[in-house]
Image (tube, rainbow, N blue to C red):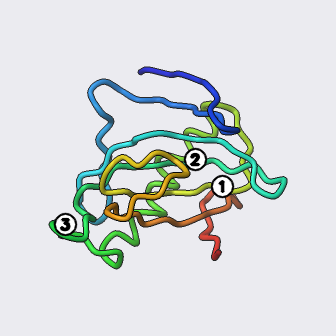
Amino acid sequence: MFRKRFGVRGCVFLIALATPAWAIDVPSGQAISLHEVLIDEVNAESWLRFRFLAPQIARDDGDVTYAQAEADFEHLCDTVARPYVVEFDLAPDVIVVALMDRPVPFGQADADATQFIEAFRIADDRCIWEAF
């Protein structure tokens, strides 16, 4: 497993990727891989962002809708984010799970990209959906 820690524009990147790309099974059955993990502070809270590539959500040629991918968010939080928090001894206030059809640099707009994003808090050793 490859691990790297570095900072960019106020964010700390923590990446843990297996070689080749870490493919993840999700309830929707779509092909998903971990793109990056970011830590930043939002309004005095620690946010841990898990950004996944999910090419099948693309609006023009994708075949997975938000409704089909909805169960993937909690699954990714429980099976990827929570173990990651334990492994790196982190204590985030918020976990954000983002699916994107193509790599988009964090904080940059891409009108052609499709992104689905949900937030969670960890309570009672499980991920609880956090309404924005």
> Relative to 62, does residue 15 appear above or below in the rendering?
above
Helix, strand, or loop for circle 3? Answer: loop
Q: Nearer the viewer, residue 124 or 28?
A: 28
Q: Are marks 1 and 2 in contact (CB under 8 Å)?
A: yes
Q: Residues within 10 Å of mark 3 (few under 14, many from 20)?
A: few
Label 1 residue SS = loop
Amino acid type for the residue under numbered disc 1: Asp
Quarter that holds the N terminus? top left
Q: Amino acid at mark 2?
A: Arg
Whole-percent x and y of residue 80?
Answer: 48, 46
In this rendering, position of residue 125 left or right of residue 72: right
Name the residue that disc number 3 marks.
62
Q: Quadrant of residue 123?
A: bottom right
Q: Of circles 3 and 1, which is in front?
A: 3
Task: Residue 83: give x, y in percent of width and height.
Answer: 55, 41
Q: In terms of sequence position, does the residue under pointer 3 or pointer 1 come before the other? A: 3
Decide which of tag 1 and tag 2 comes sooner along the chain.
Answer: 2
**Residue annotated with mark 1:** 125
Q: Please give the name of the residue rendered at 34% of the width and 69% of the height, measured from the top-left corner.
A: 69
Q: Nearer the viewer, mark 1 or mark 2?
A: 2
Mark 2 packing: few (<14 Cα in 10 Å), some, or many (20+)? Answer: some
User: Considering the numbered disc 2 on the image, is that residue within a helix, a strand or a loop?
Assistant: helix
Percent of width and height locating residue 3: 50, 22
Q: Residue furthest right?
A: 44
Figure quadrant of residue 94: bottom right
- Asked whether disc 3 touches disc 1, contact meaning CB atoms under 8 Å apart, the reply is no
> x, y (%) of residue 10?
70, 38
Q: Earlier in the sequence, mark 3 or mark 2?
A: 3
Q: Which mark is residue 82?
A: 2
Between residues 16 and 132, which one lies in front from this camera angle?
132
On-image quarter of the C terminus: bottom right
Residue type marked 3: Gly
